[in-house]
Amino acid sequence: MTIEKNELSRRTLVKGAAWSLPVIAVAAATPMAAASTATQFDVGVAPSCVGNYDLDGLLGLIAGVPGVGGAVANTVQTLLAGIGLTPFESRGFTITAVEGTVPQGTQFTLSTAPGLIDLALLDDVIDADVLGLVSVNGNSSAIVELVQPLTVGQSTTIQLSQDAVDLGVTGAASLALNGSDNPSTGAGAPNSADLNLISVDTNLGSLVDLGDLGIILAPLVSALEITVQLCPGQTLPAQP
């Protein structure tokens, strides 16, 4: 009797151990399942660079030449457009919800070379319905955040106005997501972007052929020096 009881007890223990294993496995899998259901979103940050010269400044230079009128100014703009240079429109960055919904409160840091961007003007150049200015660190960096969520496919911009960017300064600006996003596959879209700007002082005669302006006006206009700010990847062409 004693032997039978011991055998039953051992069998009972073995059965109990076998039943306990699945319980432990389920408990271990639960945190992983919870992590897989975390909110997934992907933020894309891209630079924007449109235009190369200050139109008001160019018109002022041309107006200073005796006998030069609006027709000549239009001709000069057309010649500049022919080599890929257009009046300044904006410098900035675009933030896009590439996947999912980017939560309200998501923050980004804008960094810039001293003197390139007047960060005090950021309130005027961001979409107040979507972005808010959190803080400014002198004239070198600022933090902005989403004041409402961005749903997939939506974008917002930090569109630096002409007043905010000094065309005569060479330098770099960048925008970067603070923290990280949670794309479903791979690395996702870039979370930061750089905008490297090069300023070049040059005279009009070294850029375009002004022969159509006549033998009197062409030499005068060609000597006028303008500041051109190149977008990333741009170079000044050689005179045709």
Image (cartoon, rainbow, N blue to C red):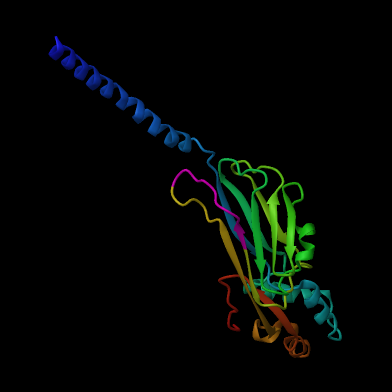
- Specify whether residue 215 is painted magenta: no
Q: Which segment did they paint magenta?
A: 175-185
> On screen, 101 above or below 78?
above
Picture quadrant where residue 143 is located: bottom right
Picture quadrant where residue 215 is located: bottom right
Please name the residue shown 72% across and 46% down the image.
147
* Residue 191 horizontal/vertical position (percent): 55, 56
Of residues 117 and 59, the one drawn nearer to the viewer in this rendering = 117
> On screen, 49 above or below 205?
above
> On screen, 38 above or below 218?
above
Please name the residue shown 37% across and 28% down the image.
26
Please name the residue shown 23% across and 17% down the image.
12
Q: Main secondary structure of the magenta part?
A: loop
- The quadrant of the image that shows the C terminus is bottom right
In this rendering, would 24 be left or right of 88? left
In this rendering, would 217 be left or right of 202? right
Of residues 168 and 51, the one drawn nearer to the viewer in this rendering = 168
- The quadrant of the image that shows the N terminus is top left
* Residue 65 horizontal/vertical position (percent): 83, 85
